[in-house]
Amino acid sequence: MPTSRSPGAPVPAAVAAVGLVVVVVGTFLPWLRSGSVRRSSYETASLVDHFSLLDHALLGAVLRSWVAVPLVAASCVALLAVRLSRTAAIGTIVLAIVVGTVAVGVLVQGGDASGPVGLVPAGPLACLAGSTIALIGALGVLATSRRIRAHGRAGIAQ
């Protein structure tokens, strides 16, 4: 009887976990500079929400749920640790796509850095790098768990 516990390979799982840690660290790094104050992604999201700077409903939902990034990342790492690899990989892929998309959007729309308010690229770049690493690791976890499952079934059939 198949189980959701997949032995997976430790290397892709470790790569995904490292990527998730980099994502979380990146969310706490500066994303926005206003005057001499540097603000993390959480402070920036709070300001954007407070001043209703986004009219799009989906973007508003992402903004309000941004505070859950560390919790979701920690949950995925915990799932990897208890070897629920496929579930962790799916969660990691979703989180990496959302955070990576936000980071790219901020980097592209960052605007003029010489004004009173500007982009600080450290946070978005760290999140983009972490998202890419986590995505590669998660895809590796899925690929190896599928290969291990297929190989296990072939061994049972013999």
Image (cartoon, rainbow, N blue to C red):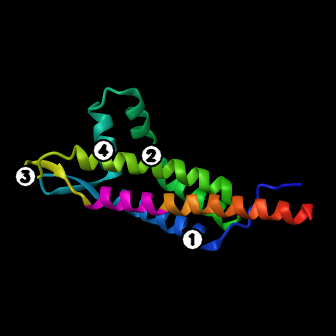
Query: Would you identify the image quadrant in which residue 6 lies?
Result: bottom right
Q: Is residue 125 magenta?
A: yes
Relative to 111, is 11 above or below?
below
Left or right: residue 75 compared with residue 32: right
Marks 1 and 3: in contact by CB < 8 Å? no
Spatial CA span between label 3 and label 2: 28 Å
Q: Is residue 84 visible?
A: no
At a point 84% along the width and 55% down the height, the residue shown is 2
Q: CA distance from mark 1 to mark 2?
A: 21 Å
Type of amino acid under label 1: Ala
Q: Is residue 57 above or below residue 36?
A: above
Q: Which residue is mark 3?
A: 114
Query: Which region of the structure is painted magenta?
Result: 122-133
Q: Circle 4 — which element?
A: helix
Q: Is residue 11 visible?
A: yes
Q: Nearer the viewer, mark 3 or mark 1?
A: 1
For marks 3 and 1 on the same chain, the one whose residue lies earlier in the sequence: 1
